[in-house]
Amino acid sequence: MEHKSNDSSIFKVAINLIGACIISGLIIATVFTLTAATAAEKLVEIKNSSLQSMVTEADTIKEIQGKPEWFEAMKNGKLIAYIVPAESKGYAGAVELLVAISPDFKVMKYTITASKETPGLGDKAKDAPFAGQFVGKDAEHLEVTKDPSKTQLIQAISGSTITSRAVTKAVREAVEAVTAFAEGGK
């Protein structure tokens, strides 16, 4: 008789677990359904805030048709910047950026959106001493150097030359892509 009692207790436990899983699944599905629209709105809000922080003086930022994730920043109806994604391989993997480029094809600013570079070394690429060197530079001057006398070029981060080159390459390619697009319409 004990054998039957164990079988029925295992059966009861299994039924209880199945019931708990079904109820949990229904609760999760309901919460997801109720919050999906809010989450999508929040993502758009975060993206717009990110873009606005790239070109703070812009009053309008709109996506460029036919160029996914490319944007034009406008002020009083006049183009003041392009904001485009860029990517290059760094020391620990891909370094992804957003780059703001002026209509005369010079770097205004960049921000790193994703990176796995070494903390304390490669992650310095997001900081002012390094990032500030890019402002006002055209594609021709986006080259990494270790020679401090070559102030027209980008000075490498000490101990992080690979990351310095990756960021510089990504920014240069973004400037070149915007130049080709604006001049050739592609």
Image (cartoon, rainbow, N blue to C red):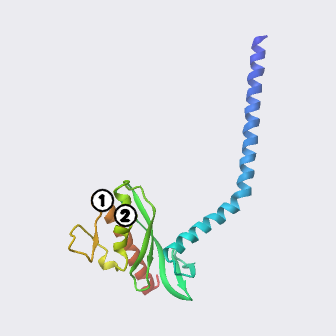
- Element type at mark 1: loop
**Do we see residue 68 in this rendering?**
no
Tell which circle, 1 or 2, labels the residue nearer the N-terminal end.
2
Residue 125, label in figure = 2
Coordinates of residue 59 in the picture (x, y in percent): 57, 82
Coordinates of residue 179 in the picture (x, y in percent): 40, 82
Identify the residue at horizontal 66%, vertical 66% (top origin). Answer: 41
Task: Name the quadrant of the N terminus.
Answer: top right
Q: Taking 105 as reference, is 156 above or below it?
A: above
Choose top left, top right, bottom left or bottom right for residue 86: bottom left
Residue 160, label in figure = 1
Q: Are marks 1 and 2 in contact (CB under 8 Å)?
A: yes
Task: Work out whether residue 70 or residue 123 is closer to the camera in this orientation and state it.
Answer: 123
182 relative position to 43: left or right: left
Circle 1: residue type: Ser
Task: Work out whether residue 67 or residue 107 is closer to the camera in this orientation and state it.
Answer: 107
Identify the residue at horizontal 22%, vertical 74% (top origin). Answer: 150
Residue 52, label in figure = none
Coordinates of residue 127 in the picture (x, y in percent): 39, 65
Choose top left, top right, bottom left or bottom right for residue 172: bottom left
**Do we see residue 168 in this rendering?**
yes
Q: Taking 47 as reference, is 66 above or below it?
A: below
Coordinates of residue 166 in the picture (x, y in percent): 34, 64
Q: Taking 8 as reference, is 144 above or below it?
A: below
Distance from Cα at disc 1 to Cα at disc 2: 9 Å
Circle 2: residue type: Ala
